[in-house]
Image (cartoon, rainbow, N blue to C red):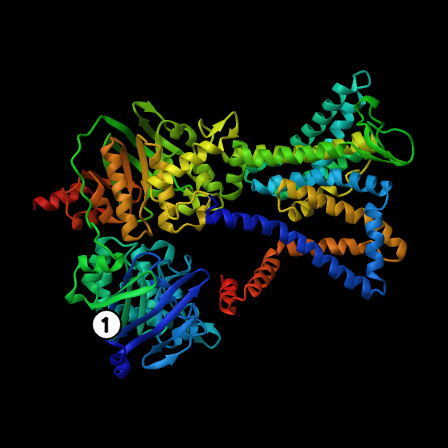
């Protein structure tokens, strides 16, 4: 029995895929115009970009490595959005995840990987969760807005990282950095391509996306989180504790960012250094937005952004600055955030197709 | 009154809206409507919610443009670009929600937007004089120097009326003006309307209260589903005929309240104090009891602590002091969930803000507050089969339209949203239910339905606390009535013991003892 609203729901699901897809296409088109304007060949530039992202095993390895942490920070922000919190602090939570994973990972030399790896992952998640729940607790107790508190916590985490790698945990000379974590706490690569490796972290990250999807759609915890996100007054009226939920969703969101930090340490650098998070916490906001805060959508948007990033380096070889990709990314966000623009296009296109009178379209815009 | 007739005698009419059609996406709000108001009459426009009354008036006031049709004001065809054009043409509108600046004085509010000036300075003295003149001329008693936040709602409404007069309105549109007034204030308003009429003003009065319409108007136009079902002379019609025209079928105007045997006292509230959002005392030293199978009505003008009382009893607001007992157990300041687990449910006054999650489908809304319990959840996982089965049965039983559990709650009409809330709150067969403004904004048919459900609950030995600003609703449903004024109880009495006038006095702050003394004299 397919009811009318089920059809509408299907249509809105289709829309939530169509809008970002069109946004990406239009943005690449605008990017092409800009490339033309600076006197380069956009077809050539995009060709090189594709090659840089997918053209070789090394390219793939680079791409997937980038994707792993972007997927997790995207999930962190997206989950927060669904539950009504704007977690700008994925950057700091990722750093804390890395720090916790590093500290635990350093001390697991005599422990077999079967135990060391889960322990280190858990430590990273706890670090992120702890950091985020400070902001959650402050919001629940005092009403302090999480946007402000998480930004402040980002700076604290940033300076804490710098202090740790140049003080208590410093090793060697040159760039201040921590020692390598124990071999048994390092995640073995999935594939090796010359010097690059495809980290097995990607499997954990995708698994995390699926877990978050199930959590949101199938569990009472997800029901409550979404209820608070949509309408806290009604949630409270329905016996859902707002303050408990805010702390809990911040903690889950932070755990995901912390996991990104832990995997970065366990798969890529095996250590931390100043600013090792390199703004990926903030990229999470973009990715969540493009993925429409849907965990499965976020898998695709993380892959999109990592591909653009991986490809943008090669574009420079044909004289197109990689800033073009930053511009393209910005335009994508613009169109996704202002989704009414694209939706109106789609509605107009489908209405023209059905040859409907212009009268109804006018009405549609008015509403 | 045929169309040719109107065309010929157009100069007798203040307003003539001809063949007005207004199309919104998916909805035809006004379908070929003809609406004509004679100069100097009080013309009531009635109809159920969503019948298109306000849409029609918003077009007359320049807020919407008609999709098709013509509007004539004082014999002249008009094409308003916005309300300012309508105001220039002599039309004034008093909205349901007042558009006043709280921390300005009455005089300042009236002249706001067209302030009298002396050179470049605001001439407050002249403004005050103007306002005083207007107020005296029509018996619109106001204190020109008082701040809006300090004066009662009835006076705020008078300020709104003065404002339209100050701007030179000859045609006044009043949207549900009596919804916020006590019976006495309503009578005062009617006196003012008559004075305005005697002075030659034309008044359009939007309402759904048939008794009032019959009392004040000269002519009545009834709308249903976007169309005009008829225009009648007030002297030639009656309540029953109007109700039929509004709903399209016979309506039971007063509900039967069969006698019941009361059970034991189940809810006991003693000397409770509750604060409002501004941390001021909103409920002061209130006490009452409710027995099984009894409806206790709380009467009072909006904003006298009823909202805070309902929230406190449902666990949403802290009880500062006093005791709240249920079934002999102290339950003061338990959490919402703990209170609900005892079999207490709550129909909130603000159904869109509190009662529903508009972005959730109907089936998710129907389990809100029970979502974590068997059979809807099992070890933290939602059991969709059970949820949907339960929802299907409730949607059918409570006649939610469309009967589609996948529909988003926000897409339902007000009446059907209320049915979803009723289904959830009554469907769980509560022992005690706190009901706030259960029929606000609902049409006659839906009101009838809600009232029937509450009476059913009472027959099933449920205890009901009914809070309503509609005195008629309180009178038709309650066994006992308590009147609240400024957070305090003005007294409690059996339904039928006092007259409407006496209850009105209590709503305005007279204690029951004072009234009983008056009775004896």
Q: Nearer the viewer, residue B430 or B2?
A: B2
- Above or below, B471 relative to A136: below
Chain for mark 1? B
Going by the picture, which residue comes out furthest to the top? A110
Q: Which residue was labeled with disc 1? A: B41
Q: Which of the 4 quarters of the picture holds residue B329? A: top left
Going by the picture, which residue comes out furthest to the front? A1
Q: Position of residue A33 (x, y in %)?
A: 77, 64
Going by the picture, which residue comes out furthest to the left? B521
Q: Position of residue A254 (x, y in %)?
A: 66, 34
Q: Residue at x 73, y 41 (%)?
A: A70
Q: Which of the 4 quarters of the picture holds residue B197? A: bottom left
Q: Nearer the viewer, residue A275 or B282?
A: A275
Q: Position of residue B19 (x, y in %)?
A: 35, 73
Local crowd size for mark 1, using a 10 Å CA cut-off: few (<14), some (14–19), many (≥20): many
Q: Nearer the viewer, residue B300 or B275?
A: B300
Q: Nearer the viewer, residue B390 or B120?
A: B390
Q: Is residue A134 visible?
A: no
Q: Position of residue A314 (x, y in %)?
A: 86, 50
- B146 left or right, relative to A23: left
Q: Which of the 4 quarters of the picture holds residue A155? A: top right
Q: Residue at x 42, y 32 (%)?
A: B336
Q: Is residue A83 visible?
A: yes
For label 1, the SS is loop
Badge count = 1
- Above or below, B489 relative to A8: above
- Screen quadrant of the N terminus of chain B: bottom left
- Above or below, A311 relative to B60: above
- A175 left or right, relative to A162: right
């Amino acid at each position: 029995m397919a009811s009318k609203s089920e059809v509408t729901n299907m249509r809105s699901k289709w829309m939530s895929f169509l809008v970002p897809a069109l946004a990406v296409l239009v943005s690449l088109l605008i990017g092409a115009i800009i490339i033309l304007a600076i006197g380069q060949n956009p077809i050539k530039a995009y060709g090189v970009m594709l090659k840089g992202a997918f053209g070789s095993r090394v390219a793939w390895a680079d791409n997937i490595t980038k994707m792993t942490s972007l997927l997790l920070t995207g999930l962190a922000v997206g989950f927060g959005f669904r539950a009504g919190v704007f977690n700008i602090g994925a950057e700091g939570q990722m750093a804390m995840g890395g720090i916790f994973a590093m500290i635990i990972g350093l001390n697991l030399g005599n422990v077999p990987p079967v135990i060391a790896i889960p322990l280190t992952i858990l430590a990273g998640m706890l670090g992120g969760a702890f950091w985020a729940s400070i902001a959650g607790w402050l919001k629940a107790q005092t009403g302090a807005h999480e946007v402000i508190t998480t930004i402040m916590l980002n700076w604290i985490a940033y300076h804490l990282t710098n202090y740790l790698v140049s003080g208590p945990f410093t090793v060697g000379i040159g760039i201040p950095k921590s020692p390598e974590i124990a071999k048994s706490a390092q995640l073995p690569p999935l594939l090796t391509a010359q010097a690059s490796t495809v980290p097995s972290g990607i499997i954990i990250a995708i698994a995390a996306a699926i877990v978050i999807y199930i959590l949101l759609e199938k569990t009472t915890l997800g029901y409550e989180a979404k209820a608070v996100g949509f309408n806290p007054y009604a949630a409270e009226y329905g016996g859902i504790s707002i303050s408990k939920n805010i702390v809990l969703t911040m903690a889950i969101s932070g755990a995901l960012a912390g996991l990104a930090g832990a995997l970065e340490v366990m798969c890529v650098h095996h250590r931390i250094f100043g600013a090792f998070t390199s703004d990926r916490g903030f990229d999470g906001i973009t990715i969540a937005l493009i993925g429409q805060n849907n965990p499965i959508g976020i898998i695709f948007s993380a892959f999109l952004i990592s591909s653009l990033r991986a490809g943008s380096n090669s574009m420079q070889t044909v004289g197109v600055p990689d800033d073009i990709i930053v511009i393209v990314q910005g335009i994508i966000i613009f169109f996704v955030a202002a989704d009414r623009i694209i939706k109106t296009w789609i509605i107009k296109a489908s209405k023209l197709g059905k040859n409907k009178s212009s009268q109804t379209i006018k009405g549609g815009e008015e509403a | 009154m045929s169309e040719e007739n109107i065309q010929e005698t157009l100069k007798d009419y203040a307003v003539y809206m001809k063949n007005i059609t207004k199309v919104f996406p998916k909805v035809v709000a006004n379908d070929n409507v003809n609406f004509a108001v004679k100069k100097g009459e009080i013309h009531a426009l009635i109809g159920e919610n969503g019948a298109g009354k306000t849409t029609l008036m918003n077009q007359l006031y320049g807020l919407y443009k008609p999709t098709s049709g013509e509007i004539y004001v004082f014999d002249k065809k008009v094409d308003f670009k916005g309300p300012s054009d309508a105001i220039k043409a002599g039309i004034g509108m008093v909205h349901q929600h007042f558009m006043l600046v709280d921390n300005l004085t009455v005089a300042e509010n009236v002249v706001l937007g067209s302030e009298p000036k002396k050179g470049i300075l605001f001439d407050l003295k002249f403004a005050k004089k103007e306002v005083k003149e207007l107020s005296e001329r029509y018996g619109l008693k106001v204190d020109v120097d008082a701040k809006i936040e300090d004066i009662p709602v009835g006076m705020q409404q008078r300020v709104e009326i003065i404002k339209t007069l100050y701007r030179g309105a000859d045609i006044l549109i009043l949207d549900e003006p009596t919804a916020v007034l006590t019976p006495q204030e309503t009578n005062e308003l009617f006196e003012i309307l008559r004075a305005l009429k005697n002075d030659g003003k034309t008044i359009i009065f939007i309402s759904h209260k048939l008794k009032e319409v019959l009392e004040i108007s000269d002519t009545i136009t009834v709308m249903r589903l976007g169309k005009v079902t008829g225009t009648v002379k007030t002297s030639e019609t009656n309540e029953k005929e109007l109700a039929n025209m509004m709903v399209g079928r016979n309506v039971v105007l007063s509900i039967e309240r069969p006698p019941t045997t009361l059970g034991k006292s189940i809810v006991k509230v003693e000397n409770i104090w509750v604060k409002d959002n501004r941390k001021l005392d909103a409920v002061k030293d209130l006490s009452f009891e409710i027995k099984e199978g009894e409806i206790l009505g709380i009467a009072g003008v909006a904003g006298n602590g009823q909202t805070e009382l309902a929230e406190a009893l449902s666990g949403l607001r802290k009880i500062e002091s006093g005791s709240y007992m249920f079934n002999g157990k102290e339950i003061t300041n338990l959490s919402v969930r703990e209170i609900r687990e005892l079999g207490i449910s709550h129909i909130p006054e603000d159904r869109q803000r509190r009662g529903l999650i508009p972005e959730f489908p109907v089936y998710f809304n129907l389990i809100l507050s029970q979502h974590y319990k068997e059979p809807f959840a099992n070890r933290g996982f939602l059991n969709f089969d059970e949820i949907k089965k339960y929802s299907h049965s409730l949607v059918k039983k409570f006649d939610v339209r469309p009967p589609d559990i996948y529909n988003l709650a926000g897409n339902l009409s007000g009446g059907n949203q209320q049915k979803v809330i009723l289904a959830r709150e009554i469907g769980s067969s509560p022992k005690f239910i706190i009901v706030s403004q259960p029929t606000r904004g609902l049409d006659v048919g839906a009101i009838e339905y809600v009232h029937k459900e509450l009476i059913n609950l009472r027959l099933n030995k449920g205890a009901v606390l009914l809070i309503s600003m509609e005195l008629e609703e309180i009178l038709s449903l309650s066994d006992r009535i308590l009147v609240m004024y400024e957070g305090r109880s003005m007294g409690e009495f059996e339904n039928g013991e006092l007259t409407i006038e006496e209850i009105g006095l209590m709503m305005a702050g007279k204690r029951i003892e004072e009234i009983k003394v008056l009775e004896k004299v």
